[in-house]
Image (spheres, rainbow, N blue to C red):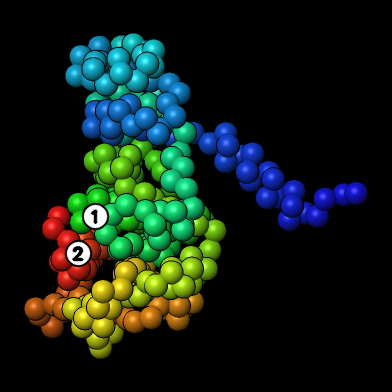
Amino acid sequence: MKKPAWVVDKERAKRAEAKETVWLFGLHAVRDALENPQREKLRLIITKNALDKLDAAVAASGLEPELVDPRKFAAPIDEGSVHQGVALEVRPLNWGSLEDVAVSGRGAPLVVLLDRVTDPHNVGAVLRSAEVFGARAVIAPRHHSAPETGALAKTASGALERQPYLRVTNLSEAMSALREAGYLLIGLDGAAPLMLSEALDQAGTRPVGLVLGAEGPGLREKTRETCDLLARIPFAGGFGSLNVSNAAAVSLYAAATHAGVKP
């Protein structure tokens, strides 16, 4: 019996995902990946100068480095990437299910949901802030979001190895699952009448999900409808705006301090 097309597509996607690899670059990002026992490491391309700086991490990883001439650095990364003489091929991290991480995982009962934020630098910065303020996870849709890349890892400054970054099939369904688990979902919207502090007061002791959209389009209509509340970050002047990573940092600080978390 012939398999339905959707079953064939799903199986093909799983096989492709199993073969997926990521090239990380830069001293900090590579060191943290080498020291992460959960990260599957495949290939290390490195100059003598970079190896001198990462010698302990390389030795502990058990990976055999490929020494190269800095003038002939041939790792398959984007031209112009600030690699600092080192690149590491890895498998993407598997953090587990939404329930395992966001509902019963470590950290404060606080998550960030990103609605079609595709810039890896923004997502990397959000991961860094989420780690600083003890959030359980950063959650994004599998499609139309920034995947793990070297640029994302470098911006995250090591947080990619420690801060759960979950990419889900459907963001609205993930939001509904979080609500069923007790989360209050607060969407950030610059035109909302409610202040973020007022929304957090309404949350009380409930877990909080902060939902942020891409710069420009903001939250999609379906995402807005799935939020429990819409709130804004107050600005001192008549006009003000923050990019998504800065808005996430401010919101995480407000939520963490409201919950009594000490970053």
Q: Amino acid at mark 2?
A: Ala
Taking the image as shown, residue 113 lies to the left or right of residue 260, namely right
Q: Secondary structure at mark 2?
A: helix
Please, what secondary structure does the residue beneath circle 1 have?
Answer: loop
Direction from residue 165 to residue 6 in the image, left or right: right
Q: Which residue is mark 1?
A: 134
Which residue in the structure is indicated by mark 2?
256
Residue 75 found in image quarter: top left
Screen quadrant of the C terminus: bottom left
Left or right: 245, with 73 as reference point: left
Kindly indicate the quadrant of the structure image that contains residue 205.
bottom left
Query: Label 1 to label 2, Cα distance in Å?
Result: 8 Å
| Amino acid type of the residue tagged 1 in the rendering | Gly
Q: Which mark is residue 203?
A: none
Q: In terms of sequence position, does the residue under pointer 1 or pointer 2 come before the other?
A: 1
Image coords of residue 74 (percent x, y):
39, 20
Residue 78, given in percent of the width and then of the height, sits at: 38, 34
Instruction: Kindly identify the residue that appears in the image at 68 percent across and 50 percent down.
Output: 10
Q: Residue at x 30, y 63 (%)?
A: 110
Q: How would you rate the neighbour count of disc 2 (Cα within 10 Å): few for under 14, some for 14-19, many for 20 or more? A: many
Query: In the rendering, at what x and y percent does residue 255 appear?
Result: 21, 68
Q: How many marks?
A: 2
**65 over 80 or under it: above or below:** above
Mark 1 in CB contact with mark 2 (< 8 angstroms):
yes
